[in-house]
Amino acid sequence: MTTDADKYTRQTLLSRTEWMPGKLFSVRVSRPEGFQFLPGQFARLGLPADDTSDAAPTIWRAYSMVSAPDENELEFYSVVVPEGDFSTRLAGLAPGARLYIDRTVFGFLTLDRFVDGEDIWLVASGTGLSAYLSMLRDPVLWQRFPRVVLAHGVRETAELAYREEIEALARQYEGRLRYLPLPTREAYADHPQARLTQLFEDGRLEQLAGISLDPARSRIMLCGNPDMVSDTRKLLSARGFAPGRRGNAGNLAVENYW
């Protein structure tokens, strides 16, 4: 008979990175033996309700893997939800603390949703960036798509986590990656201060990328705020983008990140 303990494994928090103190952080965790996933999938992380040594995990939250599938450790990116049951406690853990991971992986925001195309658009708001970082770190993305557009909508420049790593990837792949950091409340480079949906609607996102969205050759993923995902999906639907169904791979994949 399967017990609750068979469904999860106890791991160790190895290190943490503060991107925006009190708000955004990442953790690296030991990887369970045999834990396999595709870039874009997510895991359930668990913590006990109290701190006694033998307490079982009772509080669970979903987090996309930031790490590439072949890394020895797992990395997760989180926002602190004020007075939240989970994120505030996760933010307070020190290296060496215990953390639980469900043995099952979840999610369908993966590249196998698509047939190959000429360009892929990875569009995220906030911590929805997580799923794409795993893809960017994995050679499969670069083998399948000649051009990659990463659009990251945030409020403040300080929320542009992983920016240096992404910029380094843009240099490594010599122009194949078009990185568009898009704060709405602060000026950044020559980018407009506007929401992702507005930039889609008026065509400025395509102008910034220097690539036109074309249902025949473009593939696009949306991950983040449910309102952004829903509104952008409607705009794209009117232009011929749709998720796959009944054997049709489609050219659009979406994930609400909270």
Image (spheres, rainbow, N blue to C red):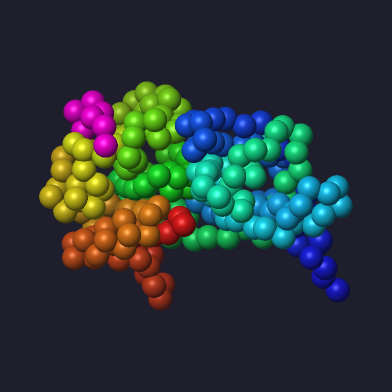
Q: Is residue 165 left or right of residue 88?
A: left
Q: Position of residue 198 (x, y in %)?
A: 19, 50
Residue at the image point whose x is 59% and y is 45% from the top: 88
Q: Which residues are magenta?
A: 185-191
Q: Which one is nearer the viewer's eye here, 137 or 25?
A: 25
Q: Is residue 232 left or right of residue 125?
A: left
Q: Which one is nearer the viewer's eye here, 7 or 173?
A: 7
Note whether residue 214 is visible: yes
Q: As drawn, which residue projects farthest toward the left?
A: 202
Q: Position of residue 77 (x, y in %)?
A: 53, 41
Q: Quadrant of residue 66?
A: top right
Q: Which one is nearer the viewer's eye here, 47 or 117?
A: 47
Q: Magenta: predominant secondary structure element?
A: loop
Q: As drawn, which residue projects farthest toward the bottom?
A: 246
Residue at the image point whose x is 86% and y is 74% from the top: 1
Identify whether 233 is placed above or below 27: below
Q: Which one is nearer the viewer's eye here, 48 or 248?
A: 48
